[in-house]
Image (cartoon, helix red, strand yellow):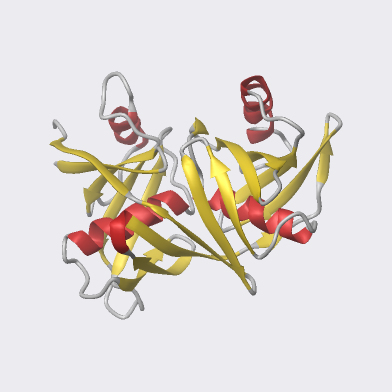
Amino acid sequence: MEFVKMEGLGNDFVVVDDPGKLSESTVQAWCDRRLGVGADGVLGVSPADPGSGAEIRMQYWNADGSAAEMCGNGLRCVARYAFDRSMVTDNAFVVATATGLKQVEVQDQGMVRVQLGSFALGEPIEIEGRVYHRASVGNPHAVTFVDEISHELVNDLGPLIETHERFSAGVNVEFVKVQATTLSMRVWERGVGETLACGTGAAAVAAVANALGEANDSVTVELLGGNLDVELVDDQAWITGPASYVFTGVLAD
C-alpha cells in the first residue's frame, strides 16, 4: 500500500487512500518510529458517501491504534492531500469526520484553514491541588494554566491526567502559559504522549482562555512545532496553519 508522510507543525501522520478499517496492531506497526514509518497517527482519505454533504471522508487513528474523534492538524493534512490530488474541484470544500462535517480551505504556501466545529466548556475540576478546565472540541481536553512549562511537568502530569478516573474516556492535557499577546502551550495527547502540536488542543486552550478573559476571539497559540492561529466565531473554532509533505513510500504487506 502506498502512503504519504505528512506533518502539521511537527504533528506527523501516515496518510493512505481509503484504508477501510485498520486493526490496532497495524496502526501501531506503521507508527512505530524504529520498526515502521514513524508517526503520531494514521489518516485515511477517501471520497465521501453520496448525499453526505461532503466531498471527502477522513478517518483517524492514534499511534496506539485507537480510533480518535478529531485531529485538527490531521484535518489540515487531509485537506491539502485531497486538493493536491484533484480529489476535489475547489480549494474550499467539506470533509466528513467522526464528529461531523468540517469546512476547509487550502490557501497559498501550504497553509490550510479548517473548521473544527463547536466547542463546549465544562466545569473546572481540581486534581491534587491543580485546576483543570474541561473543554470539548469534538474530543476531550483538560487545560491547566502554569507560570512556566517544563519538560518534567508535562511528562509527570500528562500521563497521570490522561488516564485519571475523572476522565473515563481518557483526555488530552494542555499546559498553558499566558503571554502578552499570545498563548504558549505544550500538550500530552491521549493515546500518543507529548506531541509537537495539537490543533484541537490549541482551540480548546483558546476557548478556555477567552472565557477567562485571558485572550481575544482571535489569538496565536505557540506550540513546540510552531504557531497556530485560532479564531472563535460564535461557538465555532477555526484554526489556520501549515500542512506539509515529508516523503512517500510503500508499506510492506
Give the quarter of the figure containing the N terminus: top left
Q: Residue furthest right?
A: 129
Residue 3, visible in the rendered structure: yes
* Above/below status of 59 relative to 34: below
In percent of width and height, residue 24 lies at 37, 35
Pick the residue in front: 164 or 127: 127
In the picture provided, is 3 more to the left or to the right than 139? Answer: left
Place residue 49 in its image quadrant: bottom left
* Above/below status of 253 relative to 103: above
* Above/below status of 233 relative to 114: below
In percent of width and height, residue 13 lies at 33, 41
Residue at image coords 20%, 60%: 84
In percent of width and height, residue 215 lies at 71, 57
Pick the residue in front: 38 or 9: 9
In the picture provided, is 159 more to the left or to the right than 193? Answer: right
In the picture provided, is 200 more to the left or to the right than 78? Answer: right
* Above/below status of 6 relative to 164: below
In the picture provided, is 209 more to the left or to the right than 20? Answer: right
Place residue 26 in its image quadrant: top left
